[in-house]
Image (tube, rainbow, N blue to C red):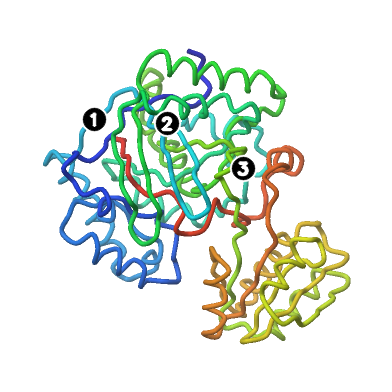
Amino acid sequence: MKDLGFSPADILLPREDIDMERWAIVACDQYTSQKEYWEEADRIAGDSPSTLRLILPECYLEESDKEERIRNVENAMKEYAENGIFRTFPDSYILVKRDTETGTRYGLVGKLDLEEYDYSPDSCSLIRATEGTILSRIPPRKEIRKNALLELPHIMVLISDSKRSVIEPIAGKKEELKKVYDSPLMLNGGHVTGYLVNSIEDKEAINNALSAIYESLSPENPLLFAMGDGNHSLASAKSCWEDIKKTLSDEEKKKHPARYALVEIENIFDPGLQFEPIHRAFFSLPKSSFDEILSNHANEIKEKEIQTIEDGVRAINSGNGSFVLIDGGKYYVYTLIGTEREMPAWTVQNVIDEMLEKEKGSVDYIHGIDTVEELAGKGALGLILPDISKETFFQSILKDRAFPRKTFSIGHANEKRYYIEARRIK
């Protein structure tokens, strides 16, 4: 089969007798300002085997006990591997059917070749970042991965398959496949079902369909896989691999497990795949200071107070505004004229960069308007960005390279990928 950077993997899943609802945990980069979510997940998981013991929620990355938490993750991985928690499905894909409040979507879990991935802003690689990669975010995530026995993916990678030729034919025959998990997901995560894809016929069909897409791409700029979620996790895996391969012979480099990263690919044209803008919450930054910094990045700023957040969202998604600002109980639509780039997220990022440089406040990147409103009610300055068009997504990447960092995500926080599958990387 043609090497296109995506291939079957030796996938680990928990034994059939393990409670899958307590095993599966949402992506670690969610609910970063809401530790109460993770405390509740910990209560639910209890003493049952759980991927919560195999990851480090990012809300704890700045805690003083971070090193101890990382060691606990490493030890839990070894314990699970040695005590028969896992069953192995060699050289396989997993078809994932995910039911959420948004709808049903399908994905395919396999491994990406990190040699085909380049997260630099001017990358023309087969696999690439869709948002700016924050280099300072890589080292703390490398600390988690570099001594880990296993990897567990929350990485979601997009393909542009308008003919629905890669994943959809496998989903159409799912009743013929072996069901390897079927469970509700904790804390309003919906439901997830996994099917084993391991026949030579199905694997060849997937490869042939990807090959056909690849052949339609420009040889000078062949974007086949675009990051959906988890770019910094994949970037950390890439950085770890760059360190490891320096110690290997050419022959060892070809087969070393750390050369690859387990991911779920999804078709951007799947109707159940919904893009959500990632919003911002500013802390210790009054509106007057925000307005002052913003004025440095736009020739003209129009500001209109509105009555409801719904009015604001309608305005910015119809092109009648750039973003919504929430200050206490008041809502404003801002329209920017004469900015460096058209997309509002770029201007907002310029504001963030200047704010951090001048040490005037801090920022968090928030999934969900309700959460932004909640934080604004506690004193934060909330900022709502407009939707991203998935119809023009790939062309935008080809034309302008990566979006500003943290511009979009796939679905609401509770619709993100839950950790289920694992793979040995040592």
| 189 lies above or below 219 | below
User: Which residue position holds label 1?
Assistant: 88
Q: Residues within 10 Å of mark 3 (few under 14, many from 20)?
A: some
Circle nearer the N terminus (2, 3): 2
Q: What kind of residue is marked 2?
A: Lys
Residue 301's x, y, as percent? 84, 74
The nearer-to-camera label among 2 and 1 is: 1
Residue 111's disc is 2
Residue 287 at what x, y percent from top left? 69, 84
Name the residue type under label 1.
Thr
The alpha-carbon separation of the residues under discs 2 and 3 comes to 21 Å
Residue under numbered circle 3: 120
**Residue at screen point 37% across, 25% down:** 197
Marks 2/1: CA distance? 15 Å
Which is more foreground, mark 3 or mark 1? 1
Residue reaching furthest left? 83
- Mark 2 nearby-residue class (10 Å; few <14, some 14–19, many ≥20): many
Residue at the outermost front position: 175
Foreground: disc 2 or disc 3: 2
Q: Is residue 419 left or right of residue 269?
A: left
- Asked if residue 41 lies left or right of residue 18, the reply is right
Give the residue at x 40% y 66%: 59
